[in-house]
Structure formats: C-alpha cells, structure tokens
Amino acid sequence: MSSGFGEFIDIWSGYEEYVNSVKEQLNITGDIGLSDLDKKVWIIDRLFGRNTNATDIENNFETQMKEFENTSVISETSSNVTIAFQEEYYNNYFKKELLDRYEGAFALQAFYKFDGAHYDVNRAKYVVDDLEVFNTSAVTYLNSTDNSLEDKLYLANNSIKNIELMRVA
C-alpha cells in the first residue's frame, strides 16, 4: 500500500478527475497534468478545504491547455504557475500532514480494524472512542503470532506513529 498511496491520493483528492475533465473539455489526448509542485499545492488546498492557490493554479493550467485544444501531442506536464511555496512546504504539510496521516488512518481502518476506534469521515479524523479498548486491541494484535512481522512493523511505522495526529473522542 505504501508504494501506491500517492496514486490513491491523486484519485481521492479529485486531482485525477480534474485533469481528466480538462482533457475532455478541450478534447486533448495525451499525458497532461500540473507541474509537480502545483499538483502538491492543489491537493493540499482541496483536501484541507482551502482555496489559497488552487483556483489560480487551475486558471493558469486551463489557459495553457487551451493552446493544445483538439490535439494529441502533449507528453509532459505543462503548468508552471509561480507560487511562493517551496519543497519545505511540501515536506512539512503534504508529506507529514497529508500522506503520512491519511495513510496511517487508512491502514488502521482498512487493515487493522482495532476495537475502540473508527474513522470519522465528517471530521476527516481517525477517532479513538475508548482509549483503553483501543490500546488493548492494538497490544493483542502486536502480541499475536498469527500476524506477520512485516504487518506489525508496517503498523508501527505508518499508523501508530500518527496517533498524535488523531483525536480521542
């Protein structure tokens, strides 16, 4: 899961749907998309319910793509919106706050399903309803010989470390 979580975020955030809608609207075939940094900032804005830069990024991208309307010659990303974000912003927010947090919460919900906790879609948080029950469930999982060492290490590395980002109800 870890190697493909970025692609999952592309779909879940609406990025893939957005790019496909631009391609369809302008009748463009080929591999188009936002620049890497624009894409990261667009996803952050959309998933955190912000509109700090997403609209400007979209407007610039769509204006640039109109030059290629009804073509099939595009083979690389084309948006070069100049914005004030740097890699540090990506590392601090996109990677830590978004990918790590949601991958951890997704794994807890989809693969581990511990008692005493659930993912609250309305609050976009993994909620621990009963900390004692949750802790007992997690310890039981970790102590079980039925679970592989790889699964336990994944849990510790990608899910448990993100507990501080979760809320206890």
Image: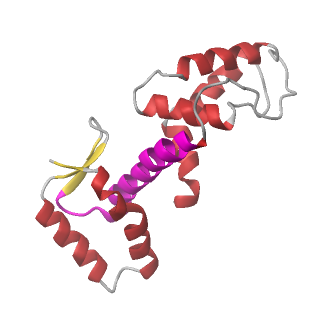
Percent position (x, y) of residue 15?
57, 32
Query: Where 25 sits versus 160, above or below?
Result: above
- In the image, 9: left or right of 57? left
Magenta extent:
88-116
Colour scheme in use: secondary structure
Q: Is residue 80 magenta?
A: no
- In the image, 161: left or right of 117? right
Quarter of the image for residue 79 reads top right
Q: State whether the magenta stretch is mostly helix, strand or loop.
A: helix
Percent position (x, y) of residue 129?
14, 53
Percent position (x, y) of residue 34?
67, 30
Q: Residue furthest bottom?
A: 145
Query: Where 163 sits versus 86, above or below?
Result: below
- In the image, 108: left or right of 51? left
Q: Is residue 111 magenta?
A: yes
101, 142: nearer the viewer = 101
Percent position (x, y) of residue 89?
53, 40
Give the total number of marks visible in the rendering. Answer: 0
Which residue is located at x 66 percent, y 20 percent?
22
Which residue is located at x 56 percent, y 48 percent?
6
Q: Residue furthest right?
A: 73
12, 97: nearer the viewer = 97
Which residue is located at x 12 percent, y 65 percent?
132
